[in-house]
Amino acid sequence: MENVLIAGQWREANASSSFQAANPATREVLAAEFPVSTWEDCNEALDAAAAAAVALRQVSGEQIATFLEAYAEQIEANADAIVDLAHAETAYPKETRLAGGELPRTTNQLRQAAAAARDGSWALPTIDTATGIRSVYGAIGPVCVFGPNNFPLAFGSASGGDFAAAIAAGNPVIAKANSSHPGTTKLFAECAQRAAEATGMPAGMVQLIYRTSHADGERLVSDIRVGATGYTGSRHAGLKLKQAADLAGKPIYLELSSVNPVAILPGALSERGEEIAEEFTGSCLMGTGQFCTNPGLVMLLAGESTETFIKAITDKFAAAPVGTLLSEGVEKSLATNLQVLVDAGAELLVGNTAADDGRFCYANTLLKVTAEQFLADPEVMQTEAFGNSSLLLVADTVDQLVQVVASLEGNLTGCIYSSSEGADDEAYDQIGGEMRVKVGRLLNDKMPTGVAVSAAMNHGGPFPATGHPAFTAVGIPGALLRFGMLQCYDNVRSHRLPGVLQDASPNGTVWRSVDGAWTQANIS
């Protein structure tokens, strides 16, 4: 059985049972066996993380940056092994998805996080010279990271954006691997541990367990030694963790579910309907639809161009190859949730059948409802069918579309396609205001599946897209704030302050109050 990483050592787990991953392309169970840790492992990891958090108070941002950069180099040195195992555990294409996409994104994130740790401006040092009050964001304490199934590298619990942000903010991380790709996560943790040893990081800065019982997972996120948790996964499991964390007053940042509404207005369809049909099909079926920003609800106004568009995308879905899903669980969930929509009255246009007994997959599926049907039961109609599927909604009027948007839950993204000549501007103004408050990222005239690693990015949104609408899981330095606590100093002597708040601080930029007016000052 594979070892866990606790307190800087790879050791045998205290296991209640074990599990194995499967190759989605063949349904074959892979050889490696992974432990389901008992609370004893969790407890030891928490003790080690708490000790590491104390040690990290004396570690500079420069040192943390050096670790993150060394880790990125370790990943690149072991890229072939990581890509090969991730391919076996997820069936994602090696060149186009893993080696050519996720892996460089992962190392880029780590290096951006290193730059943020080194610069320190993410911590928003604030000095009010008139009152003698100063504040800065500091490390919140040990962070638990639960990684998703659909991004084994760039969102992985021991490698992805949550991990990078938590470390850059000065926190140790307890990574909980996703059961779909535990071996890939182990390879990352090995790279991280080598980098930690080479750069003198405290033992317990990076730890790895693979799976726990549900009860122990809830106990973990609510433990007094935990500072915060980052979670990406299903709504059901995430809300269980949130309930436990909330009862203990522990921050937990969740990415749960999102149907990512796309409104396509008549002028846009008249101008470039075939082009939009290609964009939508490519976006919805890319990665077999297993993106958190997959366009799962497409809103249209009744008319001839809409009927032509629906026929075009139905034909494209029928003709497109059926991709491989990540696991048997994803396959079953997709089939179950599509049936929920059909039972609620959605019309089947194509798909909703099994596709290939030799792998995890399900036919490319399109369903259709009227706005009236949707508004009669919006909660059920927003059931997320995670995978290669989408629900089309046809409204009679713009007012109906506005009502539909107003009935939506929170989403990561929302998109509006409109005429380039201004023919849809009036409708856009009515719909856009409602959509703006329902989504974290509003797009025009492009599908939502790309999430750039940019300081301006918001990969978040109102509940249930995430647990808190003010934070992003992608985009540095903003993502670091989730794992920081605002620390205020009132009349504290200069030599006792963090360096960035001292009167003779190192070179940097802070906000100072000068005669009651706030100005940005370079300190040298």
Image (spheres, rainbow, N blue to C red):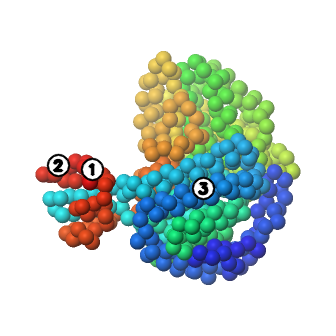
Judge from the rendering whether residue 210 lies leftward or rightward of residue 470; answer left or right: right
Circle 1: residue type: Asn
Position of residue 99 measured from the top left corner of the image (x, y, whole percent): 69, 47
Mark 3: amino acid: Glu
Label located before the other in sequence (1 or 2):
2
From the viewer's perspective, is the residue at label 2 or at label 3 nearer? 3
Task: Point out the frontmost of discs 1 and 2.
Answer: 1
Left or right: 437, with 217 as reference point? left
- Name the residue carrying label 2: 517
Q: Tag 3 or tag 2, which sits nearer the N-term? A: 3
Residue at (52%, 39%) from the top-left corner? 414
Residue nearer the viewer, 523 or 349: 523
Q: Amino acid at mark 2?
A: Ala
Disc 3 is placed on an element classified as helix
Instruction: Identify which residue is drawn at 52% across, 62% down.
Output: 67
Q: CA distance from mark 1 to mark 2?
A: 16 Å
CB atoms of marks 3 and 1 within 8 Å: no
Residue situated in front as seen by the camera: 499 or 52:
499
Residue located beneath label 3 in the image: 73
Tell me the number on the disc at residue 522.
1
> Is residue 335 in sight in this rendering?
no
Find residue 418 and report its horizontal and vertical position in percent: 51, 25
Q: Residue at x 48, y 48 (%)?
A: 475
How far apart, in angstroms, are the residues tagged by discs 3 and 1? 33 Å
Q: Position of residue 379 (x, y in %)?
A: 56, 49
Q: Indicate the position of residue 505 as horizontal and vertical percent values.
A: 28, 60
Q: How packed is label 3: few (under 14 Cα within 10 Å), some, or many (20 or more)?
A: some
Residue 520 vs residue 448, the one in the foreground? 520
Residue 270: tell me if it is visible: yes
